[in-house]
Image (cartoon, grey):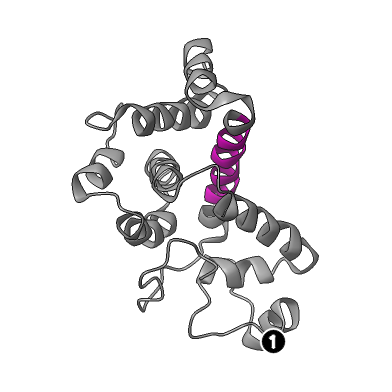
């Protein structure tokens, strides 16, 4: 059982003339199926992928770790390639797929993996992890990292519950963002 993808006409009606079925990812199409929620959902995607305060490699650490912890096949498929495009090595990507704590990463990516694990398994951060985030990134960027982890939690739940189908063609290419 799945939530059906919106048809092409419905998708175009929500996204507008910029909609290109050859390049639009299934997640974006499913977002379009939420109609009036679409601007808010895409706005969050634009914020998460557009902030200069979070590097693409750090963002991909969070995304892949969320996909691994929450068992989100769509998110893993799309972002494994984006992670490589953002500069993560195969060893780093493999480390993020771990069933237990992530090892073998540099300190900042390891901290982000730990924060992602904590938020997605306990709903919060331990004081030591929060302090480490604040020490490493400062208050504003720590808030952005926490919001990013929370976003990928919500997105993961949305992807799994709607059962967004895996991409069947290579629409990722050299992207580091689902928006192109």
Query: Left of 23 or right of it: where is 30?
Result: right
Residue at image coords 62%, 24%: 139
For the residue pair 25 and 130, the one nearer the viewer reads as 130
Residue that extends furthest to the right in the rendered view of this protein: 36
Magenta span covers which residues?
143-157
Determine the secondary structure under disc 1. loop
- Pinpoint residue 3: horizontal percent, then vertical percent: 59, 67
- 153 or 20, nearer to the observer: 20
Q: Observer-nearest residue: 115 or 163?
A: 115
| 18 left or right, relative to 78 | right
Q: Residue at (33%, 56%) from the top-left corner?
A: 80
Relative side of 162 to 110, left or right? right
**Residue 22 part of the magenta-drawn span:** no
Q: Please name the residue shown 59% across and 38% down the image.
A: 150
User: Residue 70: in sight, yes or no?
Assistant: yes
**Count of labels shown?**
1
The answer to which quarter of the image holds residue 100 is: top left
Residue 123 seen = no
Task: Name the chief secondary structure element in magenta.
Answer: helix
Q: Residue furthest left?
A: 91
């Amino acid at each position: 059982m799945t939530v059906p993808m919106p048809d092409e006409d419905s998708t175009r009606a929500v996204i507008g003339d910029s909609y290109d079925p050859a390049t639009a990812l299934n997640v974006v199409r499913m977002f379009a199926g939420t109609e009036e929620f679409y601007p808010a959902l895409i706005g969050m995607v634009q914020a998460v992928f557009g902030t200069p305060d979070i590097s693409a490699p750090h963002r991909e650490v969070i995304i892949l770790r969320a996909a691994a912890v929450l068992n989100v096949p769509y998110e893993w498929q799309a972002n494994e390639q984006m992670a490589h495009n953002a500069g993560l090595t195969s060893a780093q990507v493999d480390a993020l797929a771990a069933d237990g704590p992530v090892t073998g990463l540099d300190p900042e990516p390891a901290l982000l993996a730990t924060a992602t694990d904590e938020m997605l398994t306990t709903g919060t951060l331990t004081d030591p992890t929060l302090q480490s985030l604040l020490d490493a990134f400062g208050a504003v960027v720590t808030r952005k990292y926490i919001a990013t982890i929370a976003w990928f939690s919500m997105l993961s739940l949305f992807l799994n519950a709607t059962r967004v189908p895996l991409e069947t063609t290579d629409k990722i290419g050299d992207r580091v963002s689902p928006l192109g």
